[in-house]
Amino acid sequence: MPLADFRNHHLGLKINWRRLEDRINALAEISPIDGGGNCRLALTDEDKYGRDLVVSWMQNLGLDITIDVVGNIIGVWNVGHGAPVMSGSHIDTVRTGGRFDGCYGVLAALEVIESCQDAKISPPRPLAVGVFTDEEGARFAPDMLGSLVYVGGMPVEQALNVVAIDGPRFGDELMRIGYAGPAPCPGLSPHAFVELHIEQGPMLEANRVRIGAVTSVQGISWQEVTVLGQSNHAGTTPMSLRHDPAYVAAEITVFLRNLAREFGGDQVCTVGKIDLHPNLTNVVPAKATLTLDVRNTDEALLKLAEAKIADFLAQIAASEGVKISTRELSRFEPVIFDDRVIDCVESIAKQQGNTVQRMPSGAGHDAQMMARVCPSGMIFVPSVKGISHNAAEFTQDVDLEAGANILLHTMLALTTLEESQN
Ligand code: GLV
Ligand code: MN
Ligand code: MN
């Protein structure tokens, strides 16, 4: 069949929602937490069980499965010729994760392949599904670590030596769970990449729009700040003589909040983790360790925010008589997705009768790494009340089904994307 006719010929094709829903529920049965979510931190036993389940589904579909040196799992349905059109996401979660973040994208990509197989259609290129290691960065920073290494953005050795928040080395944990594979990184560049994901924010619901055609991902800056002070007795140490890391951590948190308010626009700032040592009621702490998550769609503003934070840290270290050191955990510039992929998502969503809007992503995603090596984009579906990284994360079935049907037709359309324009 001529390539130009291929897409029109299969316009009526649909994914099997029941099958996709069953897989989402089955994966969520691994490592459940109260409230319907999951705790499947990267490279834990729970991550291994989730991987084993997804790999067994890939095997059932007859995919060619490769596991690479940082544990990324790529399943390819080897039809047609050339580089595959790839979709996928991650199945690791934050400690208090929902059941859809990442898993929906992986399992929808699998469903797309199975639906095509059922319909006995033969795309002109292979279709592939990627399960990328440690997208969350919650246990091993940076976030999107697996896809970053996949595209050659971080040396393998550096990734293997990353140390978890609970102590072990990435490479040792990968080996322990049996997912230190032989395939090299950087991996094979896809022809195109499209990731389906829940929005994780409130915009689609507020605008009563079903589909987001994602245009970009905002820049992300993560750093760990360590404050060393003078530990002492809480009852006997006069306030004027204190060098208190807990107080300094609180001041830093307030500074970030005020900075975000002052910048306005897309600026967001979060202190999500504070550890005090020795963490006792009647002891002025010796040490505070906190993480800063600072994001903006504008790289210049993100740099300005980082500079203002650095100035503040120097200033408060001097005024409080504490030592402050910082360590970069993640730093990614904003990413703009490929116009052709955005157009494709938008037109297919409309064609299928959905409301659609173009929008940036506030969260980080594997697609932002794949954008370094091939035309890439994303499809968002609404998150009820905009809640995510929380067990209460929820998306309506009709939205999940619509998103997966758009993924199906976007992947098929991208198989005919002109190679010469890449
Ligand atoms: C990944 O989920 C991130 O945006 O932090
Ligand atoms: Mn995600
Ligand atoms: Mn997430």
Image: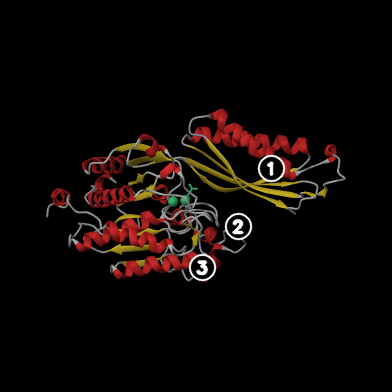
Q: From what the image shows, is residue 306 above or below residue 152?
A: above
Q: Earlier in the sequence, mark 2 or mark 3?
A: 3
Give the alpha-carbon distance from disc 1 to disc 3, as whole Å.
33 Å
Q: Secondary structure at mark 1?
A: helix
Relative placement, left or right, of 9 versus 114 is left
Q: Earlier in the sequence, mark 1 or mark 2?
A: 2
Badge 2: how crowded within 10 Å, few (<14), some, or many (20+)? few
Give how far across and how far down residue 37 sits, in percent.
47, 56
| Residue at x 55% of width, y 57% of height | 139
Count of numbered tags: 3
Give how far across and how far down residue 113 sits, in percent.
27, 60
| Residue at x 33% of width, y 58% of height | 21
Looking at the image, which is closer to me, 360 or 219?
360
Q: Which mark is residue 165?
A: 2
Looking at the image, which is closer to me, 184 or 20?
20
Callout 3, which amino acid?
Answer: Asp
Residue 201, image quadrant: top left
| Residue at x 57% of width, y 28% of height | 262
Relative placement, left or right, of 349 versus 2 is right
Q: Secondary structure at mark 3?
A: helix
Q: Which residue is mark 1?
A: 249
Callout 1, which amino acid?
Answer: Ala
Looking at the image, which is closer to me, 77 or 346?
346
